[in-house]
Image (cartoon, rainbow, N blue to C red):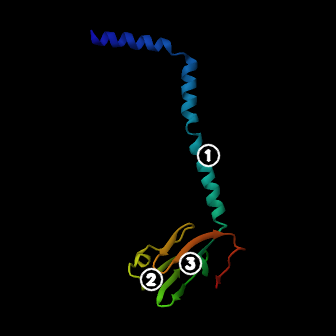
């Protein structure tokens, strides 16, 4: 008896659905994927434009730039020792990544940080007030190693 009641209810609701309703529902389902397509397209544009960007590691102390190391196209190893009184950090750029390999700060967070190689990433040594950031820019803005 229960199944007969459910079948009657289903038939009742099926008569309420019109062919145009189905078309609208299908259209809305497809339209819900439009933002995914737009964001994918924009991400593709960013990545193709990113190929023209030059990545540079910028070392700053108390907001003042003390060293710039070009990472895009970087070959070999570039070592820079930052000293400020008794405080020191040894920064190494290998290939297109940069890291801190040695520091005399008490917490050693900067030394244990993974190497950075993408724009927007940073390594911070709070006790020494030192920041190493990877920044992107056009090839004309930064070139080679700048003091």
Q: Which circle, 2 or 3, is nearer the viewer?
A: 3
Which element carries disc 1, helix, strand or loop? Answer: helix
Q: Nearer the viewer, residue 62 or 125?
A: 62
Image quarter (top left, top right, bottom left or bottom right) of the N terminus? top left
Q: Is residue 122 left or right of residue 64?
A: left
Give the label on residue 38, or none: 1
- Label 1–label 2 contact, CB within 8 A: no
Q: Which circle, 1 or 2, is nearer the viewer?
A: 2
Q: Which circle, 1 or 3, is nearer the viewer?
A: 3
Tag 2 or tag 1, which sits nearer the N-term?
Answer: 1
- Mark 1 nearby-residue class (10 Å; few <14, some 14–19, many ≥20): few
Q: Quadrant of residue 133?
A: bottom right
Q: CA distance from mark 1 to mark 2?
A: 42 Å
| Relative to 44, residue 89 above or below | below
Give the label on residue 62, or none: 3
Query: Residue at position x 55%, y 84% from top?
Result: 76
| Relative to 140, residue 9 above or below | above
Give the label on residue 96, or none: none
Residue lying at the far bottom of the rendered structure:
86
Q: Nearer the viewer, residue 136 or 66?
A: 66
- Label 1–label 3 contact, CB within 8 A: no
- Mark 2 nearby-residue class (10 Å; few <14, some 14–19, many ≥20): some
| Relative to 26, residue 135 above or below | below
Q: Which residue is mark 2?
A: 101
Residue 93 seen from this side: yes
Q: CA distance from mark 1 to mark 3?
A: 41 Å
Q: Nearer the viewer, residue 53 or 90?
A: 90
Tag 3 or tag 1, which sits nearer the N-term?
Answer: 1
Which element carries disc 2, helix, strand or loop? Answer: strand
Q: CA distance from mark 2 to mark 3?
A: 21 Å
């Amino acid at each position: 008896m229960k199944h007969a009641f459910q079948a009657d209810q289903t038939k009742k609701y099926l008569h309420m659905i019109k062919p145009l309703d189905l078309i609208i529902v299908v259209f809305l389902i497809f339209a819900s994927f439009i933002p995914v397509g737009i964001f994918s397209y924009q991400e593709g544009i960013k990545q193709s434009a990113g190929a023209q960007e030059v990545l540079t590691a910028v070392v700053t102390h108390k907001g003042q730039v003390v060293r710039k190391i070009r990472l895009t196209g970087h070959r070999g190893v570039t070592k820079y020792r930052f000293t400020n009184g008794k405080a020191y950090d040894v920064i190494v750029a290998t290939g297109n990544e940069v890291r801190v390999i040695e520091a005399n700060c008490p917490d050693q967070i900067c030394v244990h940080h993974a190497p950075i190689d993408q724009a927007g990433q940073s390594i911070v040594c709070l006790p020494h007030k030192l920041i190493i950031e990877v920044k992107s820019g056009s090839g004309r803005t930064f070139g080679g190693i700048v003091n």
